[in-house]
Image (cartoon, rainbow, N blue to C red):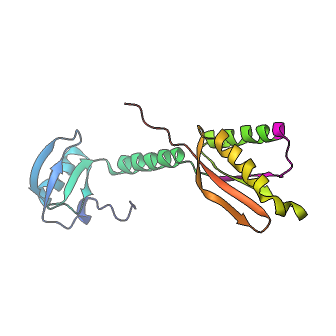
Amino acid sequence: MNNRRVRVNRQISAQSVRVITTDGTMIGIKSIFDALNMARNAGLDLVEIAPQANPPVCKIMDFSKYLYERDKQERENRKKQKMSMLKEIRINPRIASHDLQTKIRHIEEFLKDQNKVRVTVVFHGREMQHRDIGENILNSVRNSLAEYGTAEGRFQMMGNRMSITFGPKIAKPTK
């Protein structure tokens, strides 16, 4: 909601409005002049909260405090929003088992941080003839990550690369 869209005091064009006091109690439907007088007597502003309602809902409050609280809430919401990044782990088809386990631990950490991970097996030269090795590696990675994330789709071949993307497991809310 933009500052320009929130109508205050004389900017409210409706003839009658539903008035709410500062403590949240509903006064009822009043003419705009009565509502403005009530707000002026309280030393506060009449702020249009729900302009689409019939009649519009207005609240008697301090407008600058309202803007501050709304901006604070928006900042808090932006802070809570975390952008999910796509991380990529590259693996050679000749990777040793311990090295693969190390890569899997890194992938687990990325998934715990709610990031998506693309695991890519890069083939060089004649390794392209043995794509089944890459599929076996990606299958073992998928099986190892079953409790941390879910595979999004199937294996994809792009040139000399075979990849699969994992998304973090969504925590189910406890009842």
Q: Is residue 88 magenta?
A: yes
User: Is 160 on the left or on the right of 44, as rendered?
Assistant: right
- Within the image, what quadrant is residue 109 found in? top right
x and y percentages locating residue 145 in the rendered image: 64, 41
Quadrant of the rendered structure where residue 69 is?
top left
Residue span colored magenta: 86-99
Residue drawn at the location 34% of the way across and 64% of the way down: 5
Q: Is residue 146 left or right of residue 50?
A: right
Task: Indicate the position of residue 36 as horizontal and vertical percent values.
Answer: 18, 55
Residue 124 in percent (x, y) is at 88, 61
The outermost residue toward the top is: 175
Please give left or right for residue 130 compared with residue 55 in the image: right
Q: Where 23 falls versus 165 (above or below)?
A: above
Q: Position of residue 126 (x, y in %)?
A: 89, 63
Which residue is at a point 71% across and 64% down the rendered structure image?
A: 157
Q: Quadrant of the C terminus?
A: top left
Compare residues 32 and 132 and report the one nearer the observer: 132
Name the image quarter holding the N terminus: bottom left
| Residue at point 79%, 41% (across, down) | 100
Question: In this picture, is 65 found above or below 124?
Answer: above
Along the line of sight, the residue nearer the viewer: 16 or 35: 16
Instruction: Give the total of numbered labels.
Output: 0
* Front-lying residue, 43 or 31: 31
- Asked if residue 92 lies in the magenta stretch, the reply is yes
Q: Which residue lies at the image location 42% right of the left edge and 48% below the top edge? A: 68
**Closer to us: 110 or 158:** 158
